Structures are given as C-alpha cells and as structure tokens.
Amino acid sequence: MKLRKLLLLFVFALTAVANAQQLPPVPVDTGVRIGKLPNGLTYYIRHNEWPEHVANFYIAQRVGSLQEEEDQRGLAHFLEHMAFNGSEHFKENGITEFCRSLGVAFGRDLNAYTSFNQTVYNVNNVPTTRQSALDSCLIIIKDWSNGLLLEDKEIDKERGVIHGEWAMRNNASMRLLESNLPRLFPGSKWGVRLPIGLMSVVDNFTYDALRKYYKKWYRPDNQAVIVVGDVDVDHTEKVIKELFGSIPLDPNAPKVEKYPVPDNYEPIYFVDKDKELRNNQISVNMKIDAMPDSLKSRMDYLMLHFIKLQVRGMLESRFNELAQKPECNFVAAYGNVGSYTYSDTKDAFQLTVVPKENKDLEALREAVREIMRAKQHGFTESELIRSKDGFMSWIEKEYLNRDKRDNDNFGSQYSSHFVSNEPIPSIEDEHQIWNMISKIVTLETVNHYAKDIISVSDTNLVVYEFAQEKEGRIVPTADELRKTYEAARAEKLEPWVDNTKNEPLIAELPKKGSIKNTTENAALGYKELALSNGATVILKKTDYKTDEIQLTAFSKGGTCLYGEKDYSNLKFIRYANNYSGLGNFSNNELQKALAGKQCEVGFNMNVTRTNLTGHTTPKDIETFLQLVYLNFTSVAKDTLSFNSFVGQLKLVLPNQGLQPEYAFEDSLCNVIYSGNPRFSIPGEKDINKISYDRCLEIIKERTANAANYTFVFVGNYDEATLLPLIEQYIASLPAKKADNVALKDVNTYFKGEKKLDFKRKMESPKPQLANMYYAPAENTRKNDVLMRYTSEVLSNEMLKQVREDASAAYHCSASCGINLTGSTPLVTLNTSAPISEPSKLDMAAELMKKIVNEAAEKVDPDKVTKIRENMLKEAEISFKNNNFWVSTIVDWKLYGKDNYTDYKKLIENVKPEDISSYIKNVILKGGNHAEVIMRPE
C-alpha cells in the first residue's frame, strides 16, 4: 500500500509538479542489510538461498584507471592481478589454493575486473557448510582491502602475464579505440586511461610506485564489502565489523573525483583504418549530460530508463525490417541512448551503422534518415504497444522467478549501487514500479523524448568510422562523412508505416492425436508418453524456475547423412531456419506477432542428431507448441530475410582471414580433420555454395516424420494444461513408422604424430599454440568423470607453470571430452594458450607437453582433493538446473548413461592414480598427437 501511494504521488508529480525535487525516491530493498563503519567502509549483506548452500563474497572499489597519473598508466589493472599473488594471510598463490580447497575455481569463481572507475573482486559459489570457511573468505576480502604484500619477485613475474593479456586483447578494434580515444575525449582523462595501460609503464614502474598507489586509493571509504548467499546475516555483519573496523581512515586522503567529458562546440569527424578489422563501422554520437549519481535514487530515473528502452527497441525493429530489403545499403544498424563510449559522466544518443562493402556513405545516409524520421514523426501506437509488451513480459518472468535469483545477480546490483548509486528496489517493488510506469508513459511522452534526444545541432556531435585497410576497399574521408550526414539530417521525410498481420499463427488447427501409453522412470523422475503418431514425449516436472519450461526434441540422424554437395548448406542450416517464416507469416511478421511472448524455438543439426530446442513459460506454452508444430510442418520461405543474413556473411566471412586468430583456428582445424571440408570453419568459399531452397529441403526431410522424435520437456508446467496441448500440437504431427537410420562414420581425424609450425604477418605479435591428443575410449559415466578430472588437473597445472611461474601466457587451458561422431567413441584432449611474447613460445610449447606427460605418471593427491570439492559443489548446483535435466534425459535415451544416480559417488571414488592411468593408458596410448604453432612473421 505504501508503494502504491508513492507511485500515485509520482503520477501526480509528473503531471502537476514542476519541481523535480518533489518526485518520490525509489524504495531500497529491505531484504539487504546495508551499513557503514566509522572508517567509511560500506557493507551489503543478503541472505539468499538460490543456489542453496553457497555464498558469494565481493569487494567493490570506487577506484579504476582514472585515478592513475600519466606515469602510472596500467597500475590499477596491475594491482588487481597482484591481489592473487600474496597477502598478509595467504602467501604467494595461497588465496587461489585455499579457494580450490573449498571447491572454488580460479577464473570461474575467483576473479576480478578493473574498469575506468571501479575495481571489483569476487569469491563466488563458496560452500556454506563450514562457518570457518566463510569467515576465511572475509579474511581474503580484508587482505584485498589493505593486506596485499606486493613483493618484488611477484611483481616481476606478473609483468609477463599482463603482456599476455595485452597481446590477447590487442585486436584491430582495440587498437583503433586506443589510438582514437583522445579524439573522442579531447582534453579529458577518459581519452588516455584505458585500464590495460601502457606496456612501457608495466615493464618499468618501480615496486614502490605500485605500493604507493595501493596505499593511496585502496581505503575503506572507497570500498564496499558485499556478501550474498546462504549465510547468517547477523554473524556476517559481526565479522565484517571486527575485521574491517580497525582499518584506519586517513582524513587527509585524496577524494575520488568524477572526471567530466567536455562539450564540443564544433562537430568532430574522423576516419581511421586497420588491416585486421573484420568490417567497417560508422558511429554517430549526440552527447548529452548523464544523470548525476545523486539523482539516480529518484523515480524519474527509472522512468527515463524505461523510455530509453522503448526508443531503442522500436528503432531496432525498424532497422531490422529495413536491413531485409535488397536495396538497403547497411547490413545492420542500431540506435541507443547510453554511456558515451565508456564515460559515466556523459551519455549520448548513439547510431551505429555496419555498411555493406563500399556502400559506407549510402548506408550512413539511410540510417541517419531513419533516426530523423523518428525525430520528425515519432513512433506509432502499435510499435509502442509491442515494445512495452516485450519489456513487461520479461519483467513478469523475472518477478515470477523472484525466489530463484542467483547470488551474482544481487552482487552485481549492490556493486553498482555502491559505485554509481544505481537503484536497488526489491523485485516486488520493481514489478509494481515498471507496471505503473508502463501504464503512464504515453506515445506522446516517448515521441517527445525521441524528438529531444535526436539532435540536428553540431554541438556535441561526434561522427567517426573505423574501417578496413585493404586493397579495393573504398573508405570515405572525414569530410565525405560530414557532407553525407548533414545532407541526410536535413531531409524532410514521410512517417513510418507499421505493417502487421493480425491473424492466428495456425490458420486451421490440426486434428488431435492422443496419448496411447504412459510409463515412469523413477530413477530420473520423469514420465514417458507414447503418442498415437509414434512420437515419444518425456515430461519432468521441476520448480527450479517458477516461470521456465525447456524443450529439446531430438531424432537420430544428422549431418553425417549428407554428402559433399551439402557441406556449405549444413554449416548454415540453422540460420536458414531462423531467418525463415512460419505458416503464413514472414520472419518479420512473426517477430511482431510474438512480441510480449516468452517463447523461442530453433532447429539445428550435429553430426549424428537433428534437434529442435526451445524455452517458454507456463503462460505462453500454447503459443510455444504452435511454433513447434509449425517448425515441423510449415517452415515458410522468406527470401528477403535469408538474403539479409547472407549479406552479413558476405561482409564478415571474406574478411575473417585478416585476423591472426582465424588463421590459427583454421590451420588447427585443417590439421585435426586432415583437411576434410566437412569440418572446415565456415568461410568465404561457402557463401556462393549456399542454396536456401536446398536448406529448406533438408529441414523438411529431417522433420517429415514425427515418429523419429523424442520430445523432452523439463520445467514448471501444469500437466493438466500441457497434456491436451501435446495431443493437439505434437500427437497431430505428420508421421509414419519410425525410420531405421544408419549413421555414417565421417570422422577423419589425423593419425599418429602431426606438427604444423607456421608464420603469420600480424599488426601486433600474437603467437599461439595448441595440442590435441585422442584415443578410443568407452562412453561411460566413469570416463566422463575422469575426463573432467583430467581437464581440471591439467588446466590448474598449466595455470601455475605457464602463467604464474613462466609468465608466458595470460590464459591457458586443457579440455577433455568425448567425440561420438564416428563408429568408435574417442576421448579427446585439447590444450591451448595465446603466448605473451614470441621469445617465450618454444619454452611454453615444451612446457605444456611436459605437463601432460608428467600427469600421466603422477597427479598430486592434494590437488585432486581440491578439484573433487569443486566438482561435488558444481554437481549439487547443476542438479537443480533445468538444462542439466534435459541433457541428462537425452543422454539416457541415446546412450543409456544416467548422469544423476550416484554421480557424486563416482566423483568421490576417483583416486589420483585413476587420473594418471587414464591419461597414460587411454589418452596417450592412442599414439595420436597434433601440435600447431603460429609465430609472428
């Protein structure tokens, strides 16, 4: 009642009060305990039981790269790395090792990030079975706050790791952004403070420089401790006060400043190029003031956010419709109101245009024309209704799943509240607020906002293009951009016409089938229905998400049934389905008809299976099943829609070869599959071989007989509602006797030892290496567990030896899995790493092979114990996930593997020698090993 009165006051305020100060504040969620210690440290504590028996810990700092001086560029990010390299209570890599003992994995659960204005650390998914472990996590947070050791030797080792991250991220887009930030932010720190920093600083800063930066900025008044999960709130608060209350506050410490973005009174136009950029992109920015943090707690901030979302959604719909027309000169365009580049003190209306090749100016003209059409004439009532329906459908889904909001969702919210005062209402209040705002925001309000925000002024205008530098590519000059933009914004335009189709998805309902028989699987907790047309339906009722139902329908037989003439078609067949219409609806008409519905269905094929997958809500289950029915019976050819997709391919695929990463992946794929084009990465050569008609023909072949399919539903359905709908839309599908499909063995893996060591010309050195091992192996549950252990053992050891000890890579990993595409199951082991610098490539290559060979002889029991804890924790979480149950049931039906019953016992029973034996006597015994190395030329 109190909130309703507040909202009514807000409505009155909108219409009758000119003074914005009288608008009511957004209520703060009472489910989170917020406090502040005398030294200025803020804390947020929330008891949350999803997932059960785990908790997340964060420390958010209002400190980022903007706090750096010129000779400190990169120290904020470097300091974040050092948080995992020794602290008061956890020497060297003690934090990582302790967290592993709790089942908390580095990277997945233990991590951090640095941006311009914040640095946030997290320890996630900590089991809550031992209070002492939770208290120890708060000690980790305390050490991050003011107890880092920052030892000389650890600093020096981390310099190489930072180089690896810089090399990995230093692609064409990042190079263009970094070199042009001073143009985008003239006279502002935002233009010279990318968090990765300068490698000249990273290589040469003194040890004391980092320590002084740490002491200066990592202070309790800049920090918030956040704890969310299955915790005792009172106890957690007590420990926070004990641990953090004694940290002194320096009254003379410098305050964290907000750095403004100056207005530009003359327009800014520029063009820049890079040889490795995949496609050109034009950006139009109309800068506006951002909402000050101090005002974000007011209701009008949420109202403004709502209006922005509607404008963005309606422009997106218009641009998508235009992009399908053959005469359109852009592949994609987007309009949005948000932060100007990365800034938190300046927003902008942003138009982004991806032009077709050598159609840059024409594309810019057409896209600008559309935003000016919106400015001159606004949007239509039907567009706004669809946009609102889509947004409110998502809000309703979130509300119905309110007791299943995970810890990280809350943690991110509280971090944003601390750093930038983003509102944190309860989900119940938020649900009411959005419903009220949706009702009171009129078309007139939205159109008035669009008219204001889309400017025709040169003040605060920034227009630029990042383009490919390659032979034959025509790149406009900055002056040509200016003339084109000015001409387009001066045009007088006709209003937009919103064409919609108001008719049922299925013109005439099919004759109902029936359920012939029902059986139960007690072990996996599902019902199995035999339908009158021969199809099988499996139902597993869960309440893990109140408003979620997942579906996978599968049949035996996939791409292995088709020959070389269809290789290109098969690579894009799911897109042929996605970009088609259904029934009497074109693709665009279908998207409009489904506005406000939470339902999605997609078709795909792998080597051995054909699948229809999707998800919906109890409310939209009938619409969802109608889509399933139409995907089997009435996929409608939509040449305009599919050709727009092919246009995207023509822009992207011919240019992906410009990137070193593609050259490496393509070479690796070529070695692994012995050059078989069936398994090659989609490329330029495939574009002209795609036949839309043939794709539709294959889809029709694969969905012609419903008796071949098993439909697996998992989620919170109402059985009394669902069963008649199954009879109406699945039991009625065309069918005959189930086909006896004979799968073809199409696997063409290399045999024996293979090595490819090649050089590639690069704008920035990016050496890479990868290894693959494979061998015959049984497809069993125990082997699945051993493969997971193998992945974790090797990944952790590579992290320690390759990243931490050798400083040779930022990221390195091992992945072990089963390949079922041939007549014999094969275990595969893949290891890979982008290397920090060319001089370390050969050493890293030998080291990664050495790690595998050593693990084949012996695995450290203590490390296995830590991995076991993580696997048990993740298993417990996955058991309450609908996707887990879909895949488990599919595996059971296809392979007779029960991935649930006694699964935790399998994990517990694995010994270190089992892992070593599996690597030595299964994986390596196969004698198949490929190594691919790419060096900069």
Image (cartoon, rainbow, N blue to C red):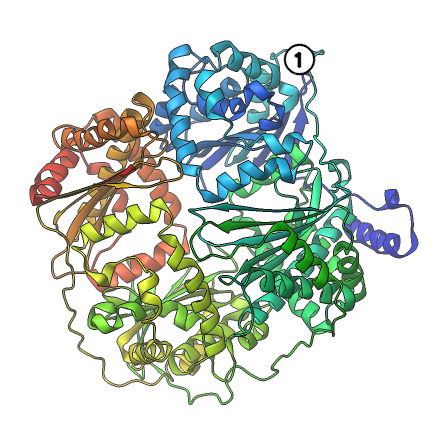
Residue 567 pos. (x, y %)? 26, 68
8 shown above or below 627: above
Per the image, label 1 sits on a secondary structure element best described as loop
Q: Which residue is mark 1?
A: 249
Residue at (38, 26) in percent of width and height: 161
Residue at (42, 63) in percent of width and height: 649
Q: Nearer the viewer, residue 159 or 686?
A: 686
Residue 299 pos. (x, y %)? 77, 48
Which quarter of the rendered picture does the C terminus lie within?
Answer: top left
Q: Is residue 761 visible?
A: yes
Q: Nearer the viewer, residue 387 or 527?
A: 387
Residue at (46, 14) in percent of width and height: 150
825 shown above or below 97: below
Image position of 197 (left or right of 695) = right
Q: Quadrant of residue 132?
A: top left
Residue 139 pos. (x, y %)? 49, 19
Residue at (67, 61) in percent of width and height: 368
Residue 756 pos. (x, y %)? 18, 43
Image position of 355 (left or right of 696) = right
Q: Nearer the viewer, residue 605 or 656?
A: 656
The three-letter amino acid code for the residue at tag 1 is Leu
Image position of 842 (left or right of 553) = left
Q: Is residue 128 visible?
A: no
Q: Nearer the viewer, residue 500 or 763?
A: 763
Categorize mark 1 by other alpha carbons within 10 Å: few (<14), some (14-19), many (20+).
Answer: some
